[in-house]
Each structure stands twice: as structure tokens, then as C-alpha cells.
Image (cartoon, rainbow, N blue to C red):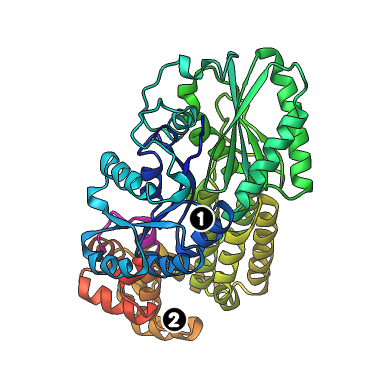
């Protein structure tokens, strides 16, 4: 029996739309096959050269290369390929123009559902000479690939266990995931290499079956079915594949799941275990084989941000810097923290350090001017070792800044500390003068002499600095509430002062 499938390429810049289409139908059961997916016209052209689909299902409005240009190029280079356009009501004029380029049909996204999509695809497939022999009226059973794709993606699917029993005769399963990077054109070649390597390394007579699952976002996935006795042998196979794959630059990392006994657990194993494990590879040795042994992840030390902030506020910089450095050193090998969360904490800590140094009038302008370079280097760090190097360099620079000059007289330091502790109230020059037994006029001159700016200018800078932190860290607080919290009873006056010092409004600063 001829098993030729009509190959479909799905092109849309929204991943949820692509995934919705891919999981909308039992494609092979209906005589079709998803040849790939792309987020724009340029990616699609790369895949067309490799996969040579029969039909392209494409959006119109996309970045990099839109649907109109893609259609024009496809019809010029591959006139035999049929194109169906996906569009919304507002894009209908664009759709009308694409028919001049030879588009076969169009489907409105708001009307997209299985029956109408299938009808348009079958009508289009009947126009393709190579597929004239296919009986598009036949109703086929659900394919194994369709069932497995639904299960691994978390979509509900009803199926008979007998449909997969012959394929998976053993009691346990294990999922292998290879991170191949961002090049969609190379995934097919790497899939073939992995499958060939696994097949050649499996010993004859071993009680192990395996099947390739559809790739997703640069991840090549293989499902293994095995007996309990084959667990150790399969791990040895994974180590051999890993060594060969890294040597030939086939993937960046290889992750292996714990064993499980129910196929219904496939989505949890993939999305909750292996994807998180790959995310945590940042904290593990670079380019390693990642193995999920199951069980709960033990939490490590937590960074005490309140104590850290208090140490900075008391100018106990040595203790604060040591605390931050020790926390970063503790992160190697950890699996209980997300990479983005960790890097954000570091950048925020650097921002706090620079802010405190400036507030206490250390010569920290060079650090302040370089802060975005520090942020960039931390966000671009590929693993925990690089991050630690970048942080230590910053802490060395900050320590030199503290050592050079602690700024001001002891009396001035006490006044600055008092302002920092009482900025949120209705603080005045007269009140501070009374607290330190100064004449207000004398304090005004003394403050300007030793602080290079007046009392009100300094108080405004402290308050606006605190407001900046609240705007970023507390999105639930309104700007009016923040204005009050930092000592301004007049919201409009707070906005004017903020714009004068920061160059933008509070709302713009929060969005940025």
C-alpha cells in the first residue's frame, strides 16, 4: 500500500498558533505530515529547501520576512508548491493581493477549526500531481506519532492502549532530549545522526525499543521503552552518544529523564523535568550530560536581601560584599533556582551597591557610568563560572572605590545617615538642625561646603533614588502611593522632581 503523505509546512510568528495547528488534527491519519514549522518567511525558505513540502500554510503579517514576500519567492523558485494563507479579517486586502501570486486558498484565523482546515487542505492536495493517487476520502486510524505528539505536548487525546502496545512492549519509559541550538535548518540532519547513533549502539538482543518524537524549539526528542534490567545499559548508551555528539558539534547538551511507567506522564517528564533541567545547566559544568534522577530538588542557601541592604545602609561594605560573593559561590551545582531570577538578583545587587556609594558620596561615578556594561556582561554569561568572574571584578572595583575615600567628616556622615533613615517623613532643614544642635543657617552652609550640593537637592536625590527602587520592585503600587512613601505629599511636585533628576517621568521609568 502506498503511504505517501502530503507534506505541510506551517509558518506563523506566533508559537501558540503554530502549535495549535500542529495539534489540531491527526495529520498522518488524514494523509498529511507536518514537515516543519517556521516563525517567519526567512526561516521558511531555509526549511523549504530541505523538506520540499507540498503545501505551505502561512500567515501574512510576520517580522523579518512577511507572507507576501515569502509567497512571491516560493512561487518564483518552487512553482509546484501550493500555498494557503492564514489571515484575520483586517488583513483581507493583503490576502486579495496574494491571489495574483498564485495562492491556492485562504483561511480566516477566527474561523480556524479542524473540519474547515482539513477540507481546504484536501481540496488543495487534489491539485498536486504527485498526490493524485491518494484517496482523500478514507478515514484512517490515529497514528502512533499523532498520539505521542499529543501526549508529550499536554493536549488531551483519547486512544486505545492496544494501539501502542506492539510498539512499546516493555514496562518502563525514558525520555532523551538533545538541545541542538537555534538553527532550524540543521535539526533534521541532527535527528538523523542521533537516530543512527542510537541504533548502532544498541546491542543485539537488548530489550530496548525507541521512537523519535517530533522536534520542538531546537530540541530533538527520543522516547525509549525498556525493561528494568536495561536501565544501566541505556545510561551507558547515553554517555556514548553524548561524547560523540559533543565531539562532532551535534548538540549543546543532552538530558536524560528518570524512568516512568505511564505514557500519560510524558508531558510532565518533558516540560516540568527535562526543560527545567536544561534551564539549570547554567549552574552545572559546561557542556555536560544532564540526568534527572527524580526526587525533590534540595534547596540551597537563600540570599538575605534585607540583611544585605542593611549592611550597605550602615556602610558595612566588606560584610555586604562577602555575603554576595559567598552566595554566588554556593550556586555551582544548584538546581533550585532559575537562571533569569539569579541574574536579575545580581544586577539588582550591583545597582544597590552603586546607589549606596553615591548616596554616601564615595567617588563612584566611574562605577555608575559602567553599570550597564556590568549588567550586560552578567546577562551574557554562559555559565556560573563566568558570572562569578564578572561579579568579583565588580566587587574589586567597588572595594577600591570604598578604600580610596569614605567622603565627608564624621558629623557629615551622621547627618547623611539620619536623612537616609528619615527621608519618608516631612523632613526639613530646621528639623535636622535641631536634631544635631545646629543653627539652620549654619547647617545649610555646612552641608553645601562638605557635600557639594544643598540640603534640599540631596534630600530630593535620596527620595527619587528610593522611588526608583519602588517603581521597579513593586508594580502593584501606584505612582501616587510611591510619591507618598518617599516623603512627597504633592504628587505633581514629585513628578516634576523625578523628571528633573531622571530625565523621564515615573511611569516611563517603570516601563523601561
Residue 445 placement: quadrant:
bottom left
Tell me what residue is drawn at x 30 percent, y 56 percent: 105
Residue 274 placement: quadrant:
top right
Look at the numbered discs 2 and 1 and tell me whether their residues touch, using CB distance below 8 Å.
Answer: no
Residue 506 percent coordinates (x, y):
31, 70
Q: Is residue 439 left or right of residue 293?
A: left
Q: Is residue 90 left or right of residue 235?
A: left
> In the depicted view, which residue is nearer to us: 496 or 92?
92
* Residue 432 vertical placement versus 457 (above, below): above
Q: Which mark is residue 344?
A: 1
- Helix, strand or loop status at disc 2: helix
Q: Magenta segment range?
A: 469-479
Q: Is residue 478 magenta?
A: yes
> In the depicted view, which residue is nearer to us: 2 or 115?
2
Asked whether the viewer can see residue 323, the reply is: no
Asked whether the viewer can see residue 137, the reply is: yes
Q: Residues within 10 Å of mark 1 (few under 14, many from 20)?
A: some
Residue 59 percent coordinates (x, y):
36, 59
Tell me what residue is drawn at x 23 percent, y 76 percent: 493
> In the depicted view, which residue is nearer to us: 158 or 494?
158
Residue assigned mark 2 = 447
Q: Is residue 228 magenta?
A: no
Q: Residues within 10 Å of mark 2 (few under 14, many from 20)?
A: some
The mark tally for this picture is 2
Amino acid at each position: 500500500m502506498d503511504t505517501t503523505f502530503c507534506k505541510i509546512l506551517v509558518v506563523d510568528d506566533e508559537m501558540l498558533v503554530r502549535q495549535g495547528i500542529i495539534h489540531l488534527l491527526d495529520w498522518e491519519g488524514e494523509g498529511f505530515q507536518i514537515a516543519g514549522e517556521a516563525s517567519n518567511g526567512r526561516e521558511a525558505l531555509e526549511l523549504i529547501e530541505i523538506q520540499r513540502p507540498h503545501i505551505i500554510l502561512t500567515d501574512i503579517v510576520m517580522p523579518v520576512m512577511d507572507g507576501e514576500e515569502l509567497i512571491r519567492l516560493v512561487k518564483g523558485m518552487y512553482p509546484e508548491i501550493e500555498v494557503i494563507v492564514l489571515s484575520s479579517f483586517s488583513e483581507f486586502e493583503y490576502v486579495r493581493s496574494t491571489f495574483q501570486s498564485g495562492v491556492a486558498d485562504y483561511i480566516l484565523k477566527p474561523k480556524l477549526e479542524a473540519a474547515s482546515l482539513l477540507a481546504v487542505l484536501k481540496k488543495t492536495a487534489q491539485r498536486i500531481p504527485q498526490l493524485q493517487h491518494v484517496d482523500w476520502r478514507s478515514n484512517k486510524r490515529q497514528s502512533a506519532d499523532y498520539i505521542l505528539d499529543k501526549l508529550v505536548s499536554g493536549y488531551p487525546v483519547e486512544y486505545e492502549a492496544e494501539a501502542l502496545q506492539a510498539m512499546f512492549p516493555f514496562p518502563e519509559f525514558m525520555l532523551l532530549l538533545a538541545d541542538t541550538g537555534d538553527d532550524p535548518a540543521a535539526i533534521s540532519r541532527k535527528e538523523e545522526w542521533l537516530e543512527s547513533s542510537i541504533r548502532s549502539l544498541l546491542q543485539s538482543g537488548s530489550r530496548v525499543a525507541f521512537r523519535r518524537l517530533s522536534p520542538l524549539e531546537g530540541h530533538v526528542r527520543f522516547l525509549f521503552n525498556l525493561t528494568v534490567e536495561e536501565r544501566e545499559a541505556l545510561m551507558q548508551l547515553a554517555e556514548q552518544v553524548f561524547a560523540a555528539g559533543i565531539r562532532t558539534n551535534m548538540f549543546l547538551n543532552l538530558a536524560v529523564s528518570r524512568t516512568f511507567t505511564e505514557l500519560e506522564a510524558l508531558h510532565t517528564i518533558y516540560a516540568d523535568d527535562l526543560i527545567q533541567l536544561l534551564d539549570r545547566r547554567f549552574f552545572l559544568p559546561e557542556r555536560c550530560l544532564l540526568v534527572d534522577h527524580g526526587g525533590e530538588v534540595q534547596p540551597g542557601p537563600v540570599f538575605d536581601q534585607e540583611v544585605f541592604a542593611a549592611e550597605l545602609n550602615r556602610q558595612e561594605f566588606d560584610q555586604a560584599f562577602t555575603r554576595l560573593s559567598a552566595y554566588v559561590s554556593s550556586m555551582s551545582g544548584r538546581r533550585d533556582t532559575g537562571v533569569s531570577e539569579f541574574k536579575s538578583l545580581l544586577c539588582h545587587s550591583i545597582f544597590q551597591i552603586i546607589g549606596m556609594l553615591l548616596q554616601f558620596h564615595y567617588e563612584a561615578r566611574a562605577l555608575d557610568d559602567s553599570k550597564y556594561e556590568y549588567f550586560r556582561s552578567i546577562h551574557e554569561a554562559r555559565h556560573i563560572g563566568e558570572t562569578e568572574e564578572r561579579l568579583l571584578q565588580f566587587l574589586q572595583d567597588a572595594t577600591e572605590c570604598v578604600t580610596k575615600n569614605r567622603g565627608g567628616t564624621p558629623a557629615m556622615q551622621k547627618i547623611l545617615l539620619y536623612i537616609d533613615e528619615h527621608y519618608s517623613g516631612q523632613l526639613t532643614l530646621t528639623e535636622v538642625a535641631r536634631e544635631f544642635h545646629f543653627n539652620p543657617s549654619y547647617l545649610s552652609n555646612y552641608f553645601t561646603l562638605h557635600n557639594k550640593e544643598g540640603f534640599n537637592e540631596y534630600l530630593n536625590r535620596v527620595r527619587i533614588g528610593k522611588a526608583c527602587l519602588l517603581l521597579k520592585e513593586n508594580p502593584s503600587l501606584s505612582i501616587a502611593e510611591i510619591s507618598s512613601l518617599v516623603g512627597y505629599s504633592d504628587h505633581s511636585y514629585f513628578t516634576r522632581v523625578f523628571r528633573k533628576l531622571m530625565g523621564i517621568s515615573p511611569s516611563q521609568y517603570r516601563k523601561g
